Image (tube, coloured by chain):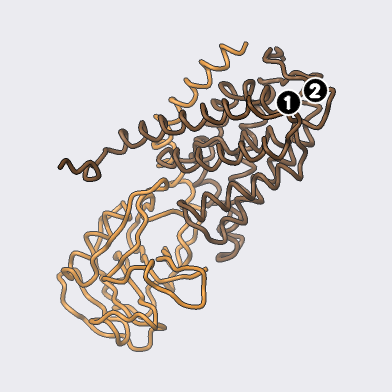
Chain colours: A brown, B orange
Amino acid sequence: MYDFHSISLSPAEMLALNVMTLSLIMLALYRGESQLDSNRPWAMLSLLAIFGISGRILLEPLPNIQPVTMLVLLAGIYFGGWRALALAGTIAWVSNVLVLGHGPWTFFQALGWGAVGLSGAGLSGFLLDGNRIRVTRLAYVSAASAFLFDWIVSSSILLETGTSMIVPYLINGLAFDLYHAAGNVAFVAWMAVPLSDMILRHSADPAREAVSEVVAN
Amino acid sequence: MSDKLKSGSLLLLFAVILLAPVIQDRLSEEAIKYVADSESAHNGMPTEWDGKQVFCTLFPEDFPHAEYSTGVTMIDSSGSTLAVNEEYNGTGACVGGLEGFTHGLDFMLNASAVVGNSLSIGYDIGEWGPLVHTIGGINSNNITGDFGGAYWHLDHNGATSMVGIGDLVMSDGDVILWRISTW
């Protein structure tokens, strides 16, 4: 009998397999959302959490490129800071406990993504034009959010070292911040509008309606 | 606008993926300038190692190494034992007197190979580069106690290394020290 489990994949093959798996999950979530009644914010947040957790785990071979920052930013814009904070903590904790490794850094990741979600809530007036999402502005904010998140997580080294280490540590991490920022911009460019359409159906603000047009800034 | 952003974002992403390793090397060189070498990192070691590179491992009290369970054994680059320092705060081994290495992982693997398998290194390649899980047969994942978990912690010249061993840029006189930390 053929031993299918003994196949060893190269890192590139594994990444391709993971991307295909994530695409299947996204398709299933998209179809699942269309069957939900409108105005079900917690159900929508649950779908975002599943996407965030699976996206973070399956894209793990790519350094610092994952959709969570965009998701908590959108959650902050449409559902408010507290729900975004709940989403941030859930994604960080579940993905770390399941696969990526749980430790003190989980708290800082939840804090970092929570701060991104709160920023989204605070900047919702700047990022929305009535009921339309300003994608270009969102791309800029998502890039800045990468640095905000990474620097909050990097501050966890103060648990073990003095403040003199923080500057070289941040300098050394700038390349990884760039990965994160570029990944965020790509996720926003390709996914912000369809995700906004989905989220708007469950947003508590009845004045917002789902549209897929993009406002030129 | 949307189509431009989509194509532009992919171009940006590919550019960052291609250029980030080069940027990372430059940033590591810049960042190291902000970290002062600790002269005390050589304290307790043979004086002939001054200015030379040293690789040390301290094993946890409850999980001692079978061969290096008393003091810290000082081993030169030919594999000969020079001394055992029993005043050291811990037990383990140091391999020193090496020079010319610039890459942390390369240095560590070469230094550990001096003593055969007794300080052999086990590591996985993860998102952030090589992640050391085993030194000298002590796997951090197997260390349990009244804590959440344990890991091999890297010190560089007496202070916590700000990068993993895969990104560590070595200079003459550098001392790297591995010890178990917990959370």
Residue A33 at what x, y percent from top left? 62, 29
Q: Are marks 1 and 2 in contact (CB under 8 Å)?
A: yes
Separation of residues labelled 1 and 2 (CA atoms):
7 Å
Q: A148 or B21, which is in the foreground?
A: A148
Give the chain of mark 2: A
**Residue of label 1:** A200
A217 over A109 or under it: above or below: above
| Residue B152 falls left or right of residue A205 | left
Q: A124 or B130, which is in the foreground?
A: A124
Residue A196 at what x, y percent from top left? 68, 25
| Residue B108 falls left or right of residue A137 | left
Q: Secondary structure at mark 1?
A: helix
What label sits on residue A208 in the rendered view? 2
Where, quadrant-wise, is the N terminus of chain A in this rendering? top left
Q: B2 or A8, which is in the foreground?
A: A8
Residue A214 at what x, y percent from top left? 68, 14
The residue sitting at 61% across, 60% down in the picture is A163
Crowding near pointer 1: few (<14 within 10 Å), some, many (20+)?
Answer: many
Q: Earlier in the sequence, mark 1 or mark 2?
A: 1
Give the chain of mark 1: A
| Residue A148 falls left or right of residue B135 | right
